[in-house]
Image (cartoon, rainbow, N blue to C red):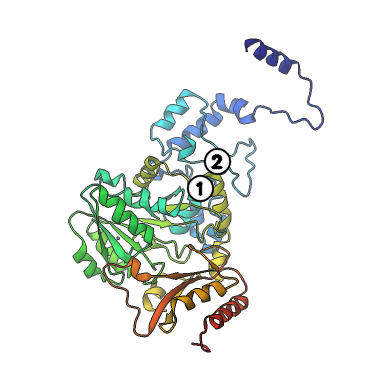
Amino acid sequence: MMKLLLLLLTVSSLWPAPCPGLLVQRPLPWRTSSMWRGGGMESAIALRMSGDENHSSMRITGKGDSMREYKLRTKVARGGQQLDGWTTDPLGRSFVNPPVYRASTITYPSMSALREALKDYPFRGLSYGRHGTPTSFALEEAFAILEGGDNACVVSSGLAAINAGAPSSIARAPVMCRAHAAILAFVSAGDHILVSKETLFLLLVSDGVYDPTRGFCDKFLKRFGVSTTYFDPLSTGEELGNAIQPNTRVLFLESPSSLSFEIHDFEALTRVARERNVVVVADNTYGPGLFRPMEWGAHVSINAATKYISGHSDVMIGLLACSKDTYRRVKRSVQQLGCPAGPDDCYLALRGFRTLSVRMKAHEEHHLWQKYFSGSSGLFTFQLKDVFSQEQVDTFCDSLSLFEIGYSWGGYESLVLPCDISSVRSVVPWEYGDGYGATIRLHIGLEDVEDLIQDLQRAFEMMGAPGKE
């Protein structure tokens, strides 16, 4: 083996100048440049790593904060592009789109740089691939700017975003802070959460929340001594206040809920929660760019970026935007759960992010909607009359050509899905109303609207719907 190694070293030392078409791996300039050893680049990195105590973020320089003053379309188009501090080009040239950085091991130019990075691990930028790369940092910065958060975390799915919020709270630190990551960051054994009936109470949760959120609260958190109370999504602030207990740690909101579409009086609920020192976590998967929960009192805004943000039905990813006083807790929870998003998924989500405002615009009701939302997405449900059998409902769905049968939403393709709203309600029973039967959810994609209307009309005819009934 030693002889072979010596032979390879000898051959490489005698290798002539590169031949045309021969690719030779050369040392990267930033690894050999005197900038590193002479204090230039190393000092710059140490400066960025030391950071300002008021900006303890993965975004390092915070240069993207200048984007916050712009309007929505500009934020979406340009957010997360201000990371030129990561360039390895000595002239400071950079790409329009952050490249895909695939990495596990991060190397350091010196022991002093390593020690500096470990002083506030993992909050000082590059440390290990699981804690982020320039690709994920760009997506986090873009989402923080969109939602109005001080910082953000990216995880492997919307459900992981919901989960990661709870472990650090299972440590019972002061309460602050898609929902597991968000919930786990703030609850401990013996705590309580409030959820709206479509969503979670110690944990208080809106009744009717995303079904996996309910499952996480009822099955996972319960095993660790965290109790959940579900409340009417149309509760007033006073009614919510009556539900808050001394050990309530988190109020979990989802507005609108993804099946029944009730709208919270967000301002009233968050005001009461904050007065009682309860962390407010909001699932904003339905309305990225249309609603900013953190402007109305939420501490954490989560998004299953699998849907509208990615926009192409080919990525599993979740995002959490955090206030300054909750970010470190959530980030630590994400780190402990070990649920990072892959760099390729981050890149694809960032690609979809750029067209978010255009896609949401292409897709306006009561006073709460008008108060909190600037528009509507393409997700809604409708109810059939009770004269139709289950077989006819199946015929309707099977007869559609452009609407595919499937879960999720936010992609370019239109979707249809029969849904039982009563299955996600426990506090306020879902009343279908006299004469009403099955509920069907539609997601409107990017197909031509006339083609979609004709597709629906044909399906109604196939199921035997009379006229415009």
Q: Which residue is mark 2?
A: 85
Percent x, y of residue 232: 28, 69
Q: Is residue 206 visible?
A: yes
Q: Secondary structure at mark 1?
A: helix
Q: Is the residue 172 above or below the residue 50 in the image?
A: below
Percent x, y of residue 342: 52, 44
Residue that lies at the very extreme toward the right in this rendered image? 20
Give 402 or 394, whichever is nearer the viewer: 394
Query: Which amino acid type corresponds to the residue marked 2 in the rendered image?
Result: Gly
Label 1 environment density (alpha carbons within 10 Å; few <14, some 14–19, many ≥20): some
Give 280 or 96, whichever is nearer the viewer: 280
Q: Is the residue 54 above or below the residue 310 in the image?
A: above
Label 2 environment density (alpha carbons within 10 Å; few <14, some 14–19, many ≥20): some
Q: CA distance from mark 1 to mark 2?
A: 9 Å
Q: Which residue is mark 1?
A: 63
Query: Which amino acid type corresponds to the residue marked 1 in the rendered image?
Result: Lys
Name the image quarter holding residue 40: top right
